[in-house]
Image: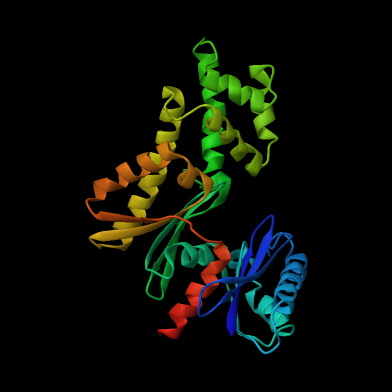
């Protein structure tokens, strides 16, 4: 039997999983710590190597590892890819490929098919694959980008509290939930509270939408507006890059996958392009992108 190993190395955890190349079935898996090369290159390497060794140890030595594909957060911006690859090759004789975590997710969700991966979670970015050509749009972080992300949506929910206050309105149930989530007892302290939050903490404000359904007018308006802004980002990318009559989109991230109002508003906006739209949702671990990368490589 032969297998491939996919490594989904993220900012908080790293998932290492092997897959049978004939059946696609998951064989062995382990989750270790963060694998972000920008934040801690040496630590990320140690954890990734540890995870790979653990997974390989669960395979019989007679079984061949055809590929180790590592999709790592921060890889594209670390400028240390050659050093990272050299250290990994010193540990493993197998074929090793390094790529970004977004590219790995693209393979996992679109299964090697050409198209765009639309990521809207804590942050946001658009990643496109057309044959061997890769391109991205956005993903510049909370200060300069992240349109349509949980971060931007969280800020919008907090700002709505201040807007209601400025208009001398009684806080809506939604705003009351936001203030409770942030443990804010005095609206005038809200700017200071938000200023001191991390990006994930700001994105976590969107949890109030779980208890306040999207059919509430205020929530629906805020969510739809953010979705339309992100859709406009995609439309700009599409119009400057492609002229296809059909587009195929993979969706990833809690905001666009789990929030029906956001997804509907996003799709309705990009329908203005006048092209057919196909959608793909996550149906496996992101690490399975290694399997689809391997299958594609056999056909080249």
Name the residue located 25 percent from the left edge and 55 percent from the top edge. Answer: 276
Residue 261 versus residue 166 in the image, above or below: below
- Quarter of the rendering containing residue 250: bottom left
Can you see residue 68? no
Residue 156: give x, y in percent of width and height: 51, 31
Q: Quadrant of the C terminus?
A: bottom left
Residue 180: give x, y in percent of width and height: 65, 23
Residue 271 versus residue 17 in the image, above or below: above
- Quarter of the rendering containing residue 279: bottom left
For residue 106, side relative to residue 276 (left or right): right
- Quarter of the rendering containing residue 154: top right
Instruction: Describe the colour scheme in one phrase.
Output: rainbow
Q: Nearer the viewer, residue 167 or 150?
A: 150
Residue 48 versus residue 174 in the image, above or below: below
Q: Nearer the viewer, residue 298 or 61?
A: 61
Name the residue located 71 percent from the left edge and 69 percent from the top edge. Answer: 48
Residue 34: give x, y in percent of width and height: 71, 59
For residue 107, side relative to residue 49 (left or right): left
Can you see residue 85? yes
For residue 142, side relative to residue 268 (left or right): right
Total labels drawn: 0
Q: Quadrant of the N terminus?
A: bottom right
Name the residue located 66 percent from the left edge and 79 percent from the top edge. Answer: 85
Residue 101: give x, y in percent of width and height: 57, 63
């Amino acid at each position: 039997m032969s297998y491939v190993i996919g490594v989904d190395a993220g900012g908080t955890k790293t998932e290492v999983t092997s897959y049978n190349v004939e059946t696609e079935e998951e064989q062995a898996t382990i989750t270790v710590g963060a694998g972000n090369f920008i934040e801690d290159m040496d630590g990320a390497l140690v954890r990734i190597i540890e995870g790979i060794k653990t997974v390989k140890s669960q395979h019989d030595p007679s079984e061949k590892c055809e590929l180790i594909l590592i999709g790592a957060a921060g890889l594209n911006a670390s400028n240390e890819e050659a050093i990272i690859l050299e250290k990994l090759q010193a540990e493993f004789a197998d074929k090793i490929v390094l790529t970004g975590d977004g590219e790995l997710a693209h393979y996992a969700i679109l299964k090697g098919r050409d198209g765009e991966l639309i990521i809207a979670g804590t942050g946001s970015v658009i990643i496109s694959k057309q044959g061997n050509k890769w391109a991205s749009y956005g993903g510049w972080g909370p200060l300069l980008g992240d349109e349509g992300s949980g971060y931007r949506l969280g800020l919008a929910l907090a700002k709505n509290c201040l807007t209601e206050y400025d208009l001398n309105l009684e806080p809506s149930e939604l705003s009351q939930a936001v203030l409770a989530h942030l443990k804010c007892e005095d609206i005038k302290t809200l700017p200071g509270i938000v200023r001191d939050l991390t990006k994930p903490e700001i994105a976590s404000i969107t949890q109030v939408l779980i208890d306040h359904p999207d059919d509430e007018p205020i929530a629906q308006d805020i969510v739809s507006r953010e979705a339309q802004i992100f859709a406009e980002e995609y439309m700009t990318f599409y119009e400057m890059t492609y002229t296809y009559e059909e587009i195929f989109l993979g969706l990833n991230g809690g905001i666009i996958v789990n929030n029906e109002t956001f997804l509907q508003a996003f799709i309705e906006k990009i329908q203005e392009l006048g092209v057919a739209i196909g959608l793909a949702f996550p149906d496996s671990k992101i690490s399975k992108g290694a399997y689809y990368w391997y299958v594609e490589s056999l056909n080249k």
